[in-house]
Amino acid sequence: MPARREITSAKNPVVHRFRDAAEGRIPGLLLAEGQRLVREALAAGLPVHEAAVSPACHDLDLIRELEARATTFLDCSVDALAKMSALETPPGVAILVERPSATEADLLGGPGAPLVVVAAGVGDPGNLGSILRAAEAAGATGCITLQGGADPFRDKAVRGSMGSVFRLPVLAGLDAAAVVDFARRHGLQVVAADGGAGTAYTAVDLRGPTLLVLGAEAAGVPGGLLAAADTRVRIPLRSPVESLNVAVAAGVLLFEARRQRG
């Protein structure tokens, strides 16, 4: 049985711990809140350090599972959990779980050709989460994020991924040189999304081992990665539209890879 505590005050140190985890300030931990994300984290097998539940949560099966799996179970007042929450409308259940970890081998996947997406300088955590979701849905084997971009394990990115960040192997905070080195050592072609490229994304063979690089909407792919690309591709757009949201662009390119791979 887990240790059990009652939390009624919004000034309790536990409240600050949950908020710190939401903002990525506790190494090794992330916050998941709401019944769907909590269930996704449990299904992924992530160890639960603390589970906070208020009377606003009526899912008795979920509560029983948290009581069985959490190291510490927190009976919270509605007000206390509201202060722990990163949401405007607190959902009544939140957990602190271990961040999933991944190795280079994990990113390369199984027997098929690897498809690794690189979020290069994507600063909006919601967009990053959506990229992770699209990557998992399209069958990508992993994701890499660059230094200076959004943290894939912060609350907004976790929510944007709808749980994909719990399952898709992610290496976070690499620099451009490390990404290029990774691609070269493992024989991945580097395909960079570039609005100024002359080659349409449908004209490139994405069936082999591929590193697909996307940059922030305004800045694009950083120069070092763009220079290292084996191929630059663009998504043809009808005028006067000049660009797509980066998560939308990621979905277009990832599902083209899926289409080609059958």
Image (cartoon, rainbow, N blue to C red):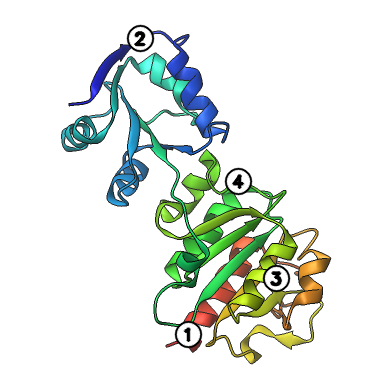
Q: Residue furthest front?
A: 185
Q: Earlier in the sequence, mark 4 or mark 1?
A: 4
Is 42 rendered above or below residue 59? below
Mark 4 lies on residue:
151
* Residue shown at 62% from the left, 65% from the top: 118
Q: Amino acid at mark 1?
A: Arg
Mark 2 near mark 4, Cβ–Cβ under 8 Å?
A: no
Q: Position of residue 80 (x, y in %)?
A: 40, 15
Q: Nearer the viewer, residue 150 or 171?
A: 171
Q: Earlier in the sequence, mark 1 or mark 2?
A: 2
Residue 180: numbered disc: 3
Q: Quadrant of the N terminus?
A: top left
Q: Nearer the viewer, residue 65 or 160?
A: 65
Q: Amino acid at mark 3?
A: Val
* Residue shown at 21% from the left, 30% from the top: 67
Closer to the observer: label 2 or label 3? 3
Residue 8: numbered disc: 2
Q: CA distance from mark 3 to mark 1?
A: 26 Å
Q: CA distance from mark 2 to mark 4?
A: 31 Å
Report helix, strand or loop for mark 2: loop
Residue 259: numbered disc: 1
